[in-house]
Structure formats: structure tokens, C-alpha cells
Amino acid sequence: LKGPAGTRQPLEDPPPAATLWVRLLLLAWPPSFRSRLADEMEHTFRERWGAARLEGRARAARLLFSTTIDLLISGVAERVSPTFVHRPQHGRASLMDSLRLDVRFALRSLLRRPGFTLVVLLTLALGVGANTAIFSVVNGVLLRPLPWPDQDRLIRISAADEQSPDVLGSMSRPDLLDVDATQAFEVAVGYTGGNATLTGLGQAEALSATRVTAGLLSVFGLSPRLGRDLTQADTETGAHEVVVLTHAFWVDRMGADPNVLNRSIELDGRPHRIVGVAPPDFAYPLGAQLWRPYEVDLEGCGRGCHTLSAIGRLADGVTLEEARGEVGALAEQLQQAFPDSNFQKVFQLVTLEETTVGSVKKGIWLLLGAVGLVLLIACANVANLMLARAQTRTGEVAVRAAIGASGKRLAGQVLVESLVLALLGGSLGLGLAFAGTSLLRDISTATIPRINEVAVDGTVLAFTAGVTLLVALMFGLAPALRVARSAPSAALSPLSRGSSGTRAEAHSRTFLLAGEVALSLMLLAGAGLLLKSFARLYAIDPGYETEGILRFSLSLPEAEYPDLESFVPFFEQVEARIAAQPGVEAVGSAFGPPLGRGDIYGSVRMEGRPAATPPAEDPVAGIRPITPGYLETMRIPVVRGRSLAESDGAGAPPVALVNERFVRENFPNEDPLGKRVDVTANFGYGAPTWTVVGVLPDIRTRSLTAEPPAEIYVPQAHFGPISMTVSVRTAPGSSIPLATLEDIVRSLDPNVPIRAVETVEQAVARQVASTRFFLSLVGLFALLALLLAATGLYGVATFLASRRRREVGIRIALGAPRPQVVGLILLQGLRPALFGVVLGLFGAWAASRSLESLLFEVDRTDPFVYAGVAAVLLAVVLVACLIPAREASRVDPVEALRTE
Amino acid sequence: LSPSSSRGAEPLSALDFHVLLVLATADLYGYAIMKAVETQSRGAVSPEIGSLYRVIGRLMNAGWVSEVEGAEYGAELHRGRPRRYYRITPLGRAALEAEADRLRHIVSLANQVLPEAPR
């Protein structure tokens, strides 16, 4: 015997949350069925999941969705018409029995009104689903601790200016050593992101190789898997050809060889001795593949040279506040000792957790707030529908009251119905949340840290269950109370049909509608403000061309290209060959291109001015090594003087260009042209005295939104470095294939990989990614809110219009003109809506404070945005009320009166 | 319930019929039934878990299908628990044959009325 699914390959088990979810769904089935077949069903689901998972994550997600729908529908069907024959049990009706009866009754009555049920379920599913998805982000990113022991002892150390203490910058090595020497820190380590080219293990490959001033493992309280961690001694001159591997690198590239210690791998053309392997799952900073010692001799400057990111571990028994006090005192001493380099320089301590997620914390809580508003609107909608329904059911309630049902029993019945609706809607919502969460993961990888840890887990399920119950109470309580109160009187007038309900009901309906409109307006205003910020961000003129430029980084092995004479011609050749390709308009290289990686700062000294004391404490500028074609490629204009030329290469006098801020800071009221400048930092290939020949505008090199620092542009031919980013501008409509670029580089040296390929447009998009992310979600929620509010208004307006059919009939029969009747009914919906708009404007104004940090060059009270969204909302409201009003005015008076 | 009296007279649903038909050749467990039905119907009938188990429940209730503990298959364990197989009963086989007869009859009727489809 062989079943068609007789394959025996090991299949993946569904995640526990999915199994739990299926078990929850099975609760929709009658217990008699469950006791016999639920285990089998769950098991079958697991097998199906395993098979689906082989076809990919999307297939498995689809399976989960279709199973959810099917289990709910079939479960309800099974309850309504059971397949197993029931043996009725005799005995007195217990609480459980009456509950069971109520549930069955509720299901039947909901199935009898499929339209109403569907609208309510969809509304609730959207509300609960969106909330669950966003909460799973809150949970995964903000609530769950980082995966390291004692994470609250891990502190990021940054330098800042007293004038702008929130702008955190890198540390200089001497400053960091002083911080490390205080009692506050057990250990403090600096690092720079870095790259290395791996050769000798197959094809040349670019690696993420972090340079550290000492081992990071001790900071994180971890021990190496093999060998030892890096130490400060490794960073001293001549001793730095050692390397510590991440566990992943050791497993993937070295085959988890236990004898790997003291073997060598070739990085940048030089052998590096492996001295240690980190424990599994540790890679800091994120994406690091190996760690190398920070080369002290690379650093040509002292305290003014801020190149290190720093992280420390608080000493035992020291609180963050105490550490801040101690480091603050140190900063003051340094300010006095080194008035130039440490002028107004302070050190900021922030927990690692805060730096990891701090930038998005506000945004994520804001999203939870926004999506909470959507849920409130959904609840208001459902409550309105329930109220309207309760009114049409007066007759039914009266009959039940007349045959002896108590008010309490009737109210219980209504509550159970709300609960059943909420549970079904919540279940559907959870299905949506599974899909939504994986969608969020996909669209926010670059924006939200730790997003890969986001999943629907136990905490999230508990949150959803809580929200669902809350929702049931929110929209079920009012109708239940109404029934309980009206039951006795309803029995006396079984056939009374109110015209449009009591005054109290009219009030609660007005209140609900106004609330819905107000909440929608708040969301729309938030979306509007973000949209305007986004437009402003895109409208920034960065000062250089952003379109049609492709760029990539080249990093040559130092062993084969030891000096300027060897690597400068290499870049010249690369540029010349690319320039010869069809469609290429310009090509040029830079170290640290706009919004790209790589950055070097150094102290600058003007010739003829007294040197600062001590000598390393001069003003600082960003140094931008470029090739002659670079400025033309980026279309950066020269404001004064001349640009760099091919003739400024080797052998020619060293010239440089500076930006306008450099001129303002260092040559106020002086002509900068012809001035001679020394730069302390260098890459070890040369540090001539530069003659300024031109002035460039201040372009946004480091970020789109921040003012650029003082900058000096120097020709690579006199300065290095060996790593450059080559930018290629092509004519509009043409492009250059990546393969062509790879061929060109490979033809010059097969051991040099191309890496970090991107367009400048992509770099710009990265800058606006987080604004775009929050904008698209808040925008989505605002649209959802608008849709819900519109359907809610439409539903209520229609209901009210139908209730007034007779009255309208009489008015028309008595000669009232139809437009007047339209106006009458229109007002009924418009009045609460207008009230809601006013309320919403106040609410939006108050809530916009929380949005402020996400806005860019837009005032949070921007009147145009507020007026715009109010107009949009009013237009939607008008349409939602106009349709039923026109409908009502077309009523035939004879027909309307006859139905009574 | 007997095949000729209550149900045999009524047409079976497509899913009921397919499930009985795959069980007529072999005892199968739940997931295998789903795959077999899908293959047999060339994808026309691909049941979800809930719908399938309602049919299985109904067929068991009618006495057309019975459960067999996996022990009969050498106590085959799957993920730590014995698989439960379903087996068609003589009553079920009779119902299936009655349904097949009914379908054959319908097909022969159709063949008389409609011209042979060109192949």
C-alpha cells in the first residue's frame, strides 16, 4: 500500500504560533465534532504546511489564509447543521447550556443577515488585523530585549557639541582612551566600519571587516568560541596583521575547522593570522564578518579627529546617571586642557537599546496610535450598525419578553452576539495580521532595525485576544443595555415602530458619527503633514546631479598597489575605459561620495598663521579626495576660481578646492584663492601643502537634511586613498550594464571585486526611506479611516432616511418641493459630520505634537494641510449623505403611506 | 441508513464521491486523501481541511467509512503519534457502486442524445 504522499523527506513543522492559531480556529467547531476529529485535522494541517513550505513562504502563507477561512466557515456550518447525529441530553438548563443556546442562536441570526454580518466582520477584521500587525512590530522591535546578556549595561559613547547635544558624532581615539580610563566603564571599545578584499579562497570577494581598538566580545560579556579576542596590543604599529572571525564566517568559509587558529587568510593582499572565532550569532556592528585591529598609524590626527564609533560596558555597580556624571566631569577637564580640539565638546552616553531602536521608537508608537484610531472608528461603525439593528428587532425582543425572557437574559443574548461577531472578526483579522506582518517585514527591512525579529508570537496573540474582547464590549454594551432597559415596556407595545428612535438614541448616534469623522480627520491631517514633508524632502536641491548616475566602489589590495604610482594609474585606466563606452557622458571617482560610505576628517592649518597649541588642535574639515572628472560627473559647479584638471596630477603642484563653509570658517573677509593649507589626516601616501584654486558650493554630502561641514577637495593623485567610489553619468535614456563595468575592472586586475553598486537615486531614496515608510502606513490607515467613516455615515444616513419614509411621503404629498426634502435629510447626516470636523481639527492640532519629530520643514499646524484634509473629508461626507437623501426624495407618497 | 434507501437514491456530492473512490483502492490518512482526491480529479476538486473532515465525519456517521488505527500498519508513527487511516466499509462500497451506476446511466443517456464528440 502506498499513499500518494508517501514521500519521506523531512518536512518543516509549522511555527508554534500557526499551530496554536489552527487550534484556536477549531474552537469554532462543535465540541462533539472536535472530540473525534480535531486532532486529526490539526495533524493534517501540519502535513499540508510542511508540503506547502517546500514551495516557499508565500505558498505557506496562502495555505494559512485559506485554511483560516475554511475552518471558520465550515465550523459555523457544522454548528448550524451538524453532521454527527446529536443525542440530546436531558436535564435542567445550566449556565453553559444557555450560553451554548445563545451562541447557536447568535450564529443563526447572523447567518440570516449575511449582508450585515459580512460588513461587520470585514470592518472588525480590518481593525483588529491592522492593530495586530502593528503591535507585532512594537513587540518585536521595542518590547523584546536585545539578544545579549545585561543589555542595559551596554552603552554607546558619542561626542557632541554643547550647542547641539543631540547631534551625536564619532569619538576621537585619545578621547575614547580617556573615557575608558574612568571608573564608570569596565571597558570601552571603538570601531570603524570597514571593508576588506578576501583573496586566495576562490574568487576575490568584498567582506565587511570592522576595525576595532580592542576586542568587542568582552564588552558584550561573551567568550570566544576558539582562541582569543583582539586586544589593544594588536592595534599597535606593526602588530596588526591578525583577525578574529565571526562564527558564521568560520562555518561557511572555513568549514568549521577546529584547527583554524594560526592559519592565515589573505585580506587586501596581505596575510592575516586568525587568532580567534566569536561565539555563534554574534556580529557587531550588524553585518560584520570579521574584526581587524584599528591601525593607529593610519590616524594622522589627534583629538580633533573623530573617526570612531564607540561602545562600552558600565562597571559593576555604576548606574548610567553616575557614569554620565563622571564622563561629564572628564569632558570639562578635556575642554580646559585642549581648548581647540575639545572646545565645547561633551560626551553623550545612550544605552545600546536606545540607539538601536531609538530613531524609530516614536514613529512606531505613533503608528500604533494611528492604527488604534482606525480600530475606534471601526468600533463606532459597528456600534452604529448594532444600534440600528437593535431598533429593527424591537418586535422580536418584544415577543421574547412577552413569553417570559428576563431583561438580563435578553441583554446576555445581545452581548453573546457581539462576542461571537468580535471573535469571528478577530479571527479573520489575525489571518490578515499574518499576511500584514510579513508584508511589513518586506517593505521595511532598510528602515526599521530588528524587523526580522518581528513575528506573531504568544504576546501578540494575547494582545489580539484582549483587543477582540475589548472591541466586543465597546460595540456590544450599548445595544445590550438598551435591550435590557426596554424589555418590559417592549412587551406592552409589541408592534410599536418608532419613527427614528428615542432622543437618547439619536444623541448616541450623533455622538458616534461625530467621533468617527473627528478621528478620521486626525488621521488624514497626520498623513497630510507627512505627505508635505515628503514632498519637501524630495524638493531639496542637494547641489549635485542625482539622476542617471551609477556608482560602485573599488578597493585595491595594498600589497600589490603600495603607492600612488601604482594605484592612481589603475583608476585612470578604469575611468578612461568606462568613458569610452557608448552613452557615458562623464566618469569620476571620489572617496566619500554624497550620501555614500567613506568619510575622513582632519585638522587643517592655514599657512602663515600661528599653529594652535598643542599642535593637533586646529580647526577640522572633511577631506574629499577626488579624480579630475568627478565634479563634472556630479555636475557640481565651481563658484570661484577653477576646477581640477587632468594636468593637476602627479608631478604638478598640489592644488585643492574648498567649499563655501570652509571659506566662511577659515578665511572670513579674505580671498581664499592662492592660500596654502595643510591637512593633518592622511592615508599614508603623502600630505603636501595644498594651494586653494577654487571654491565649491556647500552641497549636501553627508545627509539631505543637514548642513554640510567645511570641506576640502583634493586630487587623489597626490593623496590617495586606495579605495574610491567610481561614479558614471550616462546620457538620458541610456545606461551601462553592470557586466560591462565588471569586465573592465577584471580586465585590469581579476583580484579586484566591484562592490556597493548603486545609483545616486537609490542613495537619495535611502535617505527618505523612513519618512516614506511612516507616510505610507499612516496614509494607508487614513484612507482606511476615511473609507470606514464614509461607509458608516452612508449606512446611518440610509437607515435614517428609510425610517423617515412615511414622513417624507406626507411632506411630498402636502407639496413640499423635493430639493427641500433632500436638504432636510442631508442635514441629518451633515450636522454631526460638521461637528466632527471641528472636533477633529482640535484633536489633530493637539496630536500633531507627537508627529513633530517626523516632519521636515513643515509646521505641525500648517493651515493648508488642515484646510485641505477638512475639505476632502467634507466632500466625502457630502457624497455619503447625498445618495440616500436623493433616494428618499424620490419616494412615491402613495406607496410610502400605503405601507403603514 | 442504507445505500439503496435514503442516500443511494440521492446523488452524492462531488467531494463525497471522490473521497469514497480514493478509499476504494486503499486505506488512507487525512492528508493522503486530500492529495489523492486532488490528483484523481486533476485538480478540479481540492478540498480544504474543514470541508474534508466534515465529509469524513458524515461518511463515518453513515457507516460508509471506518477508522483504522495506524497500528495495523506496523504502528507507523508520524511526528510522534500513530496515523489514523480511513477504510471504506462494505456499505460504503455499495453506495459508491450505486452512485457509479447512476453516473453510468446518465452518461449513457447523454450518449444517446448527443452526437459523439470528435476526438
Image: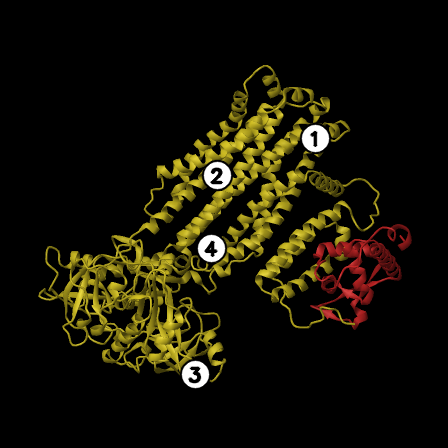
Chain colours: A yellow, B red
Q: Is residue A295 above or below residue A731?
A: below
Taking depth in this image into account, of B32 and B61 the one nearest to the observer is B32
Chain containing the residue with disc 4 = A
- Foreground: disc 4 or disc 2: 2
Residue bearing the label numbered 3: A261
Chain containing the residue with disc 3 = A
Q: Earlier in the sequence, mark 4 or mark 3?
A: 4
Residue type, numbered disc 2: Ser
Label disc, if present, on residue A407 of the rendered structure: 1
Taking the image as shown, residue A526 lies to the left or right of residue A610, namely right
Chain containing the residue with disc 1 = A
Residue bearing the label numbered 2: A520
Q: Residue farthest to the left?
A: A608
Taking the image as shown, residue A667 lies to the left or right of residue A379, namely left
Image quadrant where one finds the C terminus of chain A: top right
Label disc, if present, on residue A142 of the rendered structure: 4
Residue A617 percent location from the top left of the image? 18, 65
Marks 3 & 1 on one chain = yes
Disc 4 versus disc 2: distance between alpha carbons?
27 Å
Taking depth in this image into account, of A72 and A581 the one nearest to the observer is A581
